[in-house]
Amino acid sequence: MQLHIKSAHAALERHAALVVAVGPEQQLSPAAAAIDQHTQGQLSQALKTASFSGKAGEILPLWRLHDFPQDWLLVVGTGPSSDLQLATLLKMTQAATRHLQGLHVAHARLTFAEIEIAGVTAIEQLTHIARSVLESCYRFDRYKTQNNTPTSLTQVSFSVDERIPLAAGREALAWAQAVAAGTALARDLGNLPGNVCTPRHLAEQAQELGKGQRKLRVKVLGEAQLEKLGAGAFMAVSRGSQQEGQLVTIEYRGGPAKQAPIALIGKGITFDTGGISLKPAATMDEMKFDMCGAASVLGVMRMLLAAQLPINVVGVLACAENMPSGGAGRPGDIVTSLSGKTIEILNTDAEGRLVLCDALTYTQKTFKPVTMIDIATLTGACVVALGKVASGIFTSDDALAEDLVAAGEASLDRGWRLPLWKDYQELLDSTCADMANIGGPTAGAITAACFLSRFTEGQRWAHLDIAGSAWLSGTQKGATGRPVALLSEYLRRQAYA
Ligand code: BES
Ligand code: MN
Ligand code: ZN
């Protein structure tokens, strides 16, 4: 989809549907007022006749007003002006975008960036509105043999007032496009079923991304190499599956050659049955989303290519399938991780931390990153703690925690810090190995983070638990693409710091 920036007074494109905002007491936005004047009050007349209450996101489509060159004028309710916030504008944008698609409209002009909102800059507002348009057009219908027509919208222009110079507006749209492209890739990969999105498929997607890209270098390690390296924790999970596990590294070189990279390490369990500690059947299908951490890392790589950020970033995908089989690990097994530390596997369903601990060790040794951030659908306990609203953020580095929370806030992809105090570490004690892979019934999200912390000593590191934020359930079942937006904002701030 093409996005354009237009000054508020620019003539409308031929055929473009015009989208304007109106409040519950028929308060017309500046763009709506201009149209009303231009059409000799037809808009206010229509609002009086139609049953339009003006609540947030309500739509009144008007067809071919007299003396108005456009086919469609779409009126969108703002709700009470007293609580008109950025979130309201985004709800309105989503409703308008969906409605335009229903009308099979190809070109639209959106005027919501002209509405002043307290607490956000005009540029931030434009960026969010553009992202919302793009994300509202996302569909995953490749397995529907009917009703799988692509989105009708091909061009959307955003009108802006003098607060936004056109060049700055264009830059904001390019950024929105980059983040949305990364988010869409993460969603696509997340939504793919486990029989298609295997560890090999993820490795191929990484190679595909790197094709013809001078700044990207992709390497894939298979099980033979991982076995030889001594990645015993990773292999304890991967050995149980017919699908070969893969450790994928993607180097993006956008910064100075000598600059140490930021490393992003994603959990890529392409299906998590629990292994011998088998999960119950009821919602096991959702465990196809257990690779959303790895998908978000690929999404960030796609964003980096689109935005060409001047920074070095390494993406590492720890890809395996967690299956029960004659070759699978058993509860009670003791394995030696790549770091040399031994682990007593008390529950084979705590597999994410097992593949990740070896990926963390490998990343630290191979790339000597300035910062490591792992992203994982790690614990049901994190969903209990934070629900689907926020990703869990764990780090002992206060500045890094602050940066990640701020990036989440700014990108509307929020994370919230949970403690990583030493007091929790003893819950991982094992009677016969260096540590156990589970910490018992309490503080499950924290003990999982504590486990990972043992493989990041001397390293600036944060862990994002996205078990709640990475997908929605029930009738809305589907990947969200989070936390691509949070990470993108974090990296952008690092790149231009
Ligand atoms: N992939 C799951 C975490 C998960 C569970 C995410 C439910 C979203 C919804 C992870 O591999 C897992 O099974 N974790 C266990 C850990 C436990 C055995 C200590 C969990 O959370 O139950
Ligand atoms: Mn599991
Ligand atoms: Zn899992």
Image: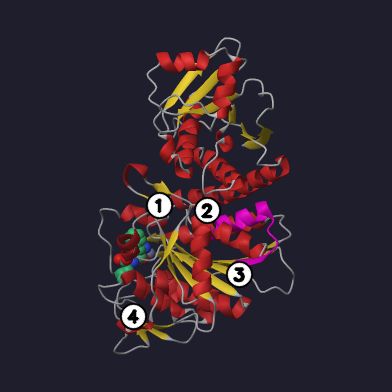
User: Is residue 407 toward the left or the right of residue 442 in the image?
Assistant: right
**Quadrant location of residue 240?**
bottom left
How many angstroms separate mark 2 from mark 3 (CA)?
A: 19 Å
Q: In terms of secondary structure, where does tag 1 sit?
A: strand
Quadrant for the C terminus, please. bottom right
Badge 3 amino acid:
Ile
Q: Between label 2 and label 4, give the one nearer the viewer.
A: 2
Residue drawn at x 70%, y 73% is: 259
User: Is residue 72 toward the left or the right of residue 377 in the image?
Assistant: right
> Cβ–Cβ below 8 Å for labels 2 and 1?
no
Give the mark nearer the N terminus: 2 vs 4.
2
Q: Residues within 10 Å of mark 3 (few under 14, many from 20)?
A: many
Magenta range is 296-314
Find disc 1 in the rendering and name its residue: 471
Q: Residues within 10 Å of mark 1 (few under 14, many from 20)?
A: many
Q: Between label 2 and label 3, give the one nearer the viewer.
A: 2
Give the mark nearer the N terminus: 2 vs 1.
2
Badge 2 amino acid:
Ser
For residue 295, say whether it is visible: no
Badge 4 amino acid:
Tyr
Give the camera-side residue of 198 and 473.
473
Numbered marks: total? 4
Beta carbon at label 3 within 8 Å of ligand 3: no
Badge 1 amino acid:
Trp
For residue 383, say whether it is visible: yes
Find disc 2 in the rendering and name its residue: 411
